[in-house]
Amino acid sequence: MPKPALHVDPSLLQDCAEVVDVPHRFIPYGEMADLWAIDRLNSGDCRRGKRAAIKTIKALVK
């Protein structure tokens, strides 16, 4: 019996968003907190889990 074809949704292999661009002006605290939160999601939490998932998927699909 032939081995079934492996399919991986391409969105799973896309890397996380880049870091937030900080404007060159005074940034009020509320805006700064929002930018920081977005940056943490993009570069911190997402990157750690996503890189591990991408490496695992690529190893399994080989």
Image: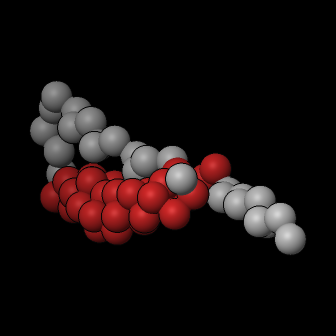
Quarter of the figure with residue 2: bottom right
Q: Residue at x 52, y 63 (%)?
A: 60
Location of the N terminus (image quadrant): bottom right
Q: Residue at x 27, y 54 (%)?
A: 43
Place of residue 38 in the rendered image (x, y in percent of width and height, measured from the top left): 33, 57
Q: Residue at x 45, y 58 (%)?
A: 59
Residue 34 at least partly seen: no
Quarter of the figure with residue 50: bottom left
Q: Residue furthest front?
A: 1
Place of residue 49 in the rendered image (x, y in percent of width and height, measured from the top left): 34, 68
Residue 55 at least partly seen: yes
Q: Nearer the viewer, residue 55 or 51?
A: 55
What colour scheme was applied to this rendering of the protein? secondary structure
Q: Residue furthest top?
A: 24
Q: Does residue 17 appear to the left or right of 3 in the view shown?
A: left
What count of labels does the image hold? 0
Place of residue 52 in the rendered image (x, y in percent of width and height, measured from the top left): 34, 64
Q: Nearer the viewer, residue 6 or 46?
A: 6
Place of residue 11 in the rendered image (x, y in percent of width and height, measured from the top left): 61, 53
Quarter of the figure with residue 55: bottom left
42 is higher (above) or lower (below) than 60:
above
